């Protein structure tokens, strides 16, 4: 925890405002939960570069939620199936999957990923707004950030 405070204070000393840092961290956390393994790191890097966000901060948030990303794949897939009214996708049991043709397997995986992404999009947008607000309040109250701001 102390390490995270030092990092936040360092980022503030570099000129990033608490609200901008809060937005950066919120995006990193939300994107880090994208239910497709391997994609969040690249998306975070692209967003940081295109929106001029702090790259180490967004990647730190992304990596911090990596275990949560894996944990959320199944619930997001189920929620996406419910949101799209397609119900549970059949042949998701290991034995049935082994007997699928490569094309059918790709189709099944694409459908599962699509369901999960729909659910993630529905949740991520309000989550970023709420996290940005909460992190801004929290960052403005950290003593390390107050001291960093007083130094400038």
Image (cartoon, rainbow, N blue to C red):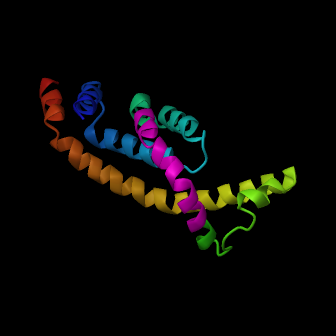
- Please state, as top left, top right, bottom left or bottom right, where the N terminus lies in the image: top left
**Residue at horizontal 52 percent and vertical 33 percent from the top:** 45
Q: Is residue 78 magenta?
A: yes
**Residue at horizontal 33 percent and vertical 40 percent from the top:** 20
Is residue 119 visible to the viewer in this orientation of the structure? yes
Q: Position of residue 127 (x, y in %)?
A: 41, 57
**Residue at horizontal 66 percent and vertical 55 percent from the top:** 113
Q: Is residue 148 magenta?
A: no
**Where does the magenta region start and end?**
59-79
- Please state, as top left, top right, bottom left or bottom right, where the C terminus lies in the image: top left
Q: Position of residue 93 (x, y in %)?
A: 71, 61
Q: Position of residue 59 (x, y in %)?
A: 45, 34
Main SS class of the magenta portion in the image: helix
Nearer to us in this view, 133 or 142: 142
Is residue 33 visible to the viewer in this orientation of the structure? no
Q: Position of residue 140 (x, y in %)?
A: 19, 42
């Amino acid at each position: 925890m102390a390490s995270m405070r030092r990092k936040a204070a360092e980022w503030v000393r570099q000129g990033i405002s608490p609200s901008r840092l809060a937005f950066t961290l919120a995006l990193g956390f939300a994107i880090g939960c994208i239910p497709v393994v391997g994609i969040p790191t690249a998306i975070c890097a692209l967003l940081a570069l295109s929106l001029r966000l702090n790259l180490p901060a967004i990647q730190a948030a992304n990596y911090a939620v990596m275990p949560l990303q894996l944990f959320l794949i199944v619930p997001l897939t189920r929620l996406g199936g419910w949101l799209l009214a397609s119900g549970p996708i059949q042949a998701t049991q290991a034995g049935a999957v082994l007997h699928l043709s490569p094309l059918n397997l790709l189709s099944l995986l694409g459908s599962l990923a699509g369901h999960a992404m729909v659910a993630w999009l529905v949740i991520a947008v309000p989550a970023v707004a709420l996290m940005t607000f909460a992190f801004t309040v929290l960052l403005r109250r950290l003593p390390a950030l107050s001291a960093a701001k007083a130094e400038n």
